[in-house]
Image (cartoon, grey):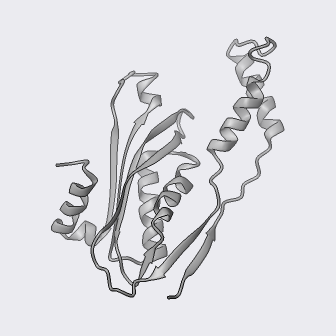
Amino acid sequence: MTLQRTTVHETDGINLAAAEQAAGQFLRALGLRTDTESMRGTPQRMARAYAELFSPRPFDLTTFPNDEGYDELVLARAIPLRSVCEHHLLPFVGTAHVGYLPGQRILGLSKLARVVEHFACRPQVQERLTKQIADWLQTQLAPKGVGVVIEAEHTCMTLRGVQATGSTTITSTMLGTLRDDPRSRGEFLALTRVVG
């Protein structure tokens, strides 16, 4: 069995000291005092929290030969998802359902969740995030088909503005057979339990 491993890592310079200073200025500009006992450490905590939100963990993308010729759907349901809306820098949280129809290679199952996390760790819009995950899997695996469905609650819509508490947004990207064959597409969507 030939194992293929590719390390996925994104390195961007994070300057925590500058972020802390900017966070303090931001809070003070909004009329909040940062010199009280309870708020003194807030700029630092805020900088560290956003640095953590924006830093994907490196991982090894592990694939294996599809020696048994498995040709049915592989689906990871309800992968926890958290990201930040790039328009307001407020969180959105939900679940991703990611599946593929194997070609010559199969993927280590935990890597489906790692791919979701990787692309969610930057300010995002849900539509782009959904497509990035699908396109990346298509490129890395060359499967017969890929499907990604994300269902998330956006706090930029539920906590502010329209305040549509409890609303969720669903996006999907289907590639290959999962896009072109109605039966395969239907099976994928039924198994995600998003429609039915």
Q: Which x, y percent locates residue 84?
A: 54, 40
What's the residue at 24%, 50% (across, down)?
193
| Quadrant assignment, res 11 | bottom right
Q: Is residue 10 left or right of residue 131?
A: right
What's the residue at 27%, 67% (across, down)?
178
Q: Which x, y percent locates residue 2?
A: 53, 87
What's the residue at 16%, 49% (across, down)?
196
Question: 108 or 194: nearer the eye?
Answer: 108
| Quadrant assignment, res 173 | bottom left
What's the residue at 29%, 79% (across, down)?
71
Q: Is residue 180 positioned above or below 105 on the image?
A: above
* Total count of labels: 0
Question: 97 or 28: nearer the eye?
Answer: 97
Q: Which x, y percent locates residue 140?
A: 49, 74
Q: Is residue 137 left or right of residue 185?
A: right
Q: Is residue 52 left or right of residue 108?
A: right
Q: Is residue 151 positioned above or below 112 on the image?
A: above
Q: Is residue 192 positioned above or below 38 on the image?
A: below
Question: 111 or 123: nearer the eye?
Answer: 111
Q: Which x, y percent locates residue 47?
A: 73, 34
Q: Is residue 25 left or right of residue 115?
A: right
| Quadrant assignment, res 70 | bottom left
